[in-house]
Image (cartoon, rainbow, N blue to C red):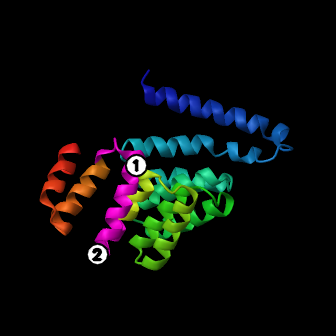
Amino acid sequence: VSDGVQLAGALKELERDLRNSTAAAASHLNSSMLIGYPDLIRAENRVLAKQRVSAVEFYDRAVASSDYWLYRLRRGINFYRLGRWQQALTDLDATLSQRPHVARVLSLRARTLFALGHVTEAFSSWQSALSLNPYDPLILLHQSFALRDEQRFDDALQSLNHALEFGSRNQHIWDARGRLFLYDKQFFLRATHDLARA
């Protein structure tokens, strides 16, 4: 039996068990969030198979079953990857209404706002994210990309320098700083060093 067939059978069994236990679990807070879990798994499997468009249907079903923040977040990430920025923003805002202090969700919101052309609001969202986690390498890396796009090369360099404090093993940070040194600052020896590290 293929893995796909086994997974489909396991998900159907899980759905049956969830339906049977819904009444018993009704008194438990947030028990409804479990109902959408099989559809979340179906959606995530389609994402892994590079079928993001067909994943939307299953994310929609998961969200329809419960307003659980994780379903909104995963659908929002998928919309972001599909370039459906406004739908991504709606889901990220809904996620943050339940989980307002998750730095990486705030950062993804900033990236979405930046893609929509809302530059000031995007940097405000990055500021909120960094106030929660000032040295998160991925948040700083993505902020640096936006700063570079805005021709704020010194600020972008500062973000990348901070990112390297905890992200010195991340090749993307070294690559980003090397490219900034090469193309924007024209510090060729420093660019060579960073690109070699990358």
Please report the residue visible at 20 percent of the width from the left and 68 percent of the height from the top: 184
* Image coords of residue 4 (percent x, y): 44, 31
Q: Which residue is farthest top?
A: 1
Please state which of residues 176 and 104 is positioned toward the viewer in this rendering: 176
Question: Which residue appears at 29% of the width and 70% of the height?
Answer: 153
- Which residue is at a point 60% across and 34% down the rendered structure image? 12
Tell which of 125 and 131 is nearer to you: 131
Q: Tell me if residue 163 is in the magenta stretch.
A: yes
| Main SS of residues in magenta | helix
Please state the horizontal and vertical placement of residue 181, each as a whole percent of the image. Answer: 20, 61
**Residue 82 visible, this angle:** no
Amino acid residing under circle 1: Glu
Check residue 68 in the rendering and tell me which mark sits there, or answer none: none
User: Foreground: 23 or 112?
Assistant: 112
| Disc 1 to disc 2, C-alpha distance | 23 Å
Q: Looking at the figure, which quarter contains the N terminus?
A: top left
Residue ID for mark 2:
151
Q: Residue at x 43, y 65 (%)?
A: 111
Do the residues under discs 1 and 2 have CB atoms within 8 angstroms? no
Secondary-structure class at tag 2:
loop
Q: Please, what is the three-letter code of the amino acid marked with disc 2? A: Gln
| Disc with the residue nearer the chain's start (1 vs 2) | 2
- Kind of element beneath mark 1: helix
Pointer 1 residue: 165
| Image position of 136 with respect to 94: above or below | above
Quadrant (top left, top right, bottom left, bottom right) of the C terminus: top left
Q: Circle 1: is it few (<14), some (14-19), or many (20+) Cα within 10 Å? A: few
| The magenta segment | 145-171
